[in-house]
Image: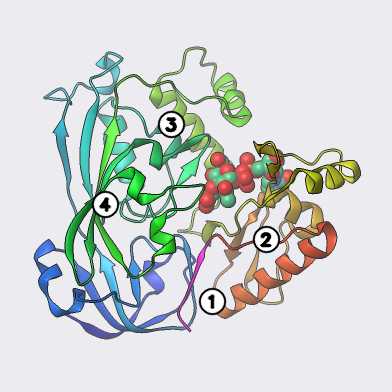
Amino acid sequence: MVRHNVSLVRFNTFNLPCIAERYLALTDLRQLNGPEFEQAPELVLGGGSNMLLLDRVPGLTVHVALGGITVLNGAPSPPPPASAAKYPLPATTVRVAAGVDWNQFVRYTLDRGWYGFENLILIPGTVGAAPVQNIGAYGAEIAERIEAVHVWEYGVGARVLTPEECAFGYRDSRFKHEPGRFLIIAVDLRLNGDHELKTGYGAIQAELARLNVETPSPNDVALAVTNIRRSKLPDWFFLGNSGSFFKNPVVRKAEHDRLKAVYEDLPSYPIDDDHVKLPAGWLIDRAGLKGVRNDGAVGTYAKQALVLVNHGGASGQEVLAFSKLVQAEVLAKFGVALEREVRLIGT
Ligand code: EPU
């Protein structure tokens, strides 16, 4: 049932006030045959974790609340308790409905002794939103383990997209480039099988050493990632935020060399022979903007400058204005343009 003038403040991790003109919760696939799904709604809302909501969303907001996890093949039945799991386990495919909370899904796998998503623990948002920006952390990305994405194509009907058809990239996919074409309803994910744990990130190695773990299990990696994330990223339940607000900019190597000559401690990650990725958090930090706050309720997080936070009572317009100041300062100091990672929604 479509409701009118519904507040989205509880449905976005930035805790920003916003009114949806019309609002529909999608809880059952049969609803897709209704007139609301003949064309794209103004907004498809999952966990509301990667968006900056302005005051009002005109038109229809569809809140995806489809639930359920189905094991398609490969998993031992009944699943072994985590401690008894023998590695490697047979490769397993699970079909996860779009409305399932991503972190609850990761915990569901780890509780069964399954593995593959341990690096992606604690990422806020839903499974349906995860492929859109190809969520990633600590050397892993969801795209590596996507077998298929089940979509509703407005005006066409149900379709299944292969990973190639999804055109995944760094925080990127076809779904970002063709907004308004598809609604993700479920994702088939590959678990278990031959799998090398990704512990290459310095922060993970340091945390495993601190935990005195020499031969890590997937659960150890998950614990290390949990500890790192908790130490750097604010819990939106207490401090509204949308994770990394900007993307890490990719610059030409010559541009990197020019900066490196001035800032010897500039961290960088090579992309190809001619391009280098720079950490936006470092740039914002070194522009003197870590842990700062405007006259109102918006600032950068004290432990991670790339995260903008709502100290309570901020509006989307206020966050947007603050983010433009951050962009301007970084451009003035380093000559590097920061691009938003979060989506700007509404008016
Ligand atoms: N840094 C600073 N000061 C800061 C923040 C960072 O100097 O205030 C430096 C760090 O010391 C490090 C570098 O910048 O040398 C990178 O920082 P970090 O390891 O925290 O990672 P990030 O590049 O800021 C990215 C993702 C995160 C993901 C982490 C770990 C993007 C835009 N962000 O952050 O993803 O959790 O790596 O893999 O790629 C998200 O997308 O919402 C998100 C949190």
Q: Nearer the viewer, residue 153 or 239?
A: 153
Q: Is residue 283 left or right of residue 41?
A: right
Q: Residue at x 69, y 43 (%)?
A: 275
- The residues colored magenta run 342-347
Q: Secondary structure at mark 3?
A: helix
* 338 versus 216 height, above or below: below
Task: Tell me the distance, in whole angstroms, between the alpha carbons under discs 3 and 4.
Answer: 19 Å
Residue at numbered disc 4: 100
Mark 2 touching mark 3, by CB under 8 A?
Answer: no
Q: Is disc 4 surrounded by few (<14), some (14 to 19) or many (20+) residues within 10 Å?
A: many
Which is nearer the N-term, disc 2 or disc 3?
3
Per the rendering, the mark at residue 316 is 1
Q: Position of residue 220 (x, y in %)?
A: 44, 24
Task: Based on the picture, tell me whether residue 53 belongs to the magenta stretch.
Answer: no
Confirm or reject: label 2 Cβ below 8 Å from ligand 1: no
Per the rendering, the mark at residue 222 is 3
Q: Residue at x 74, y 56 (%)?
A: 284
Q: Residue at x 34, y 19 (%)?
A: 194
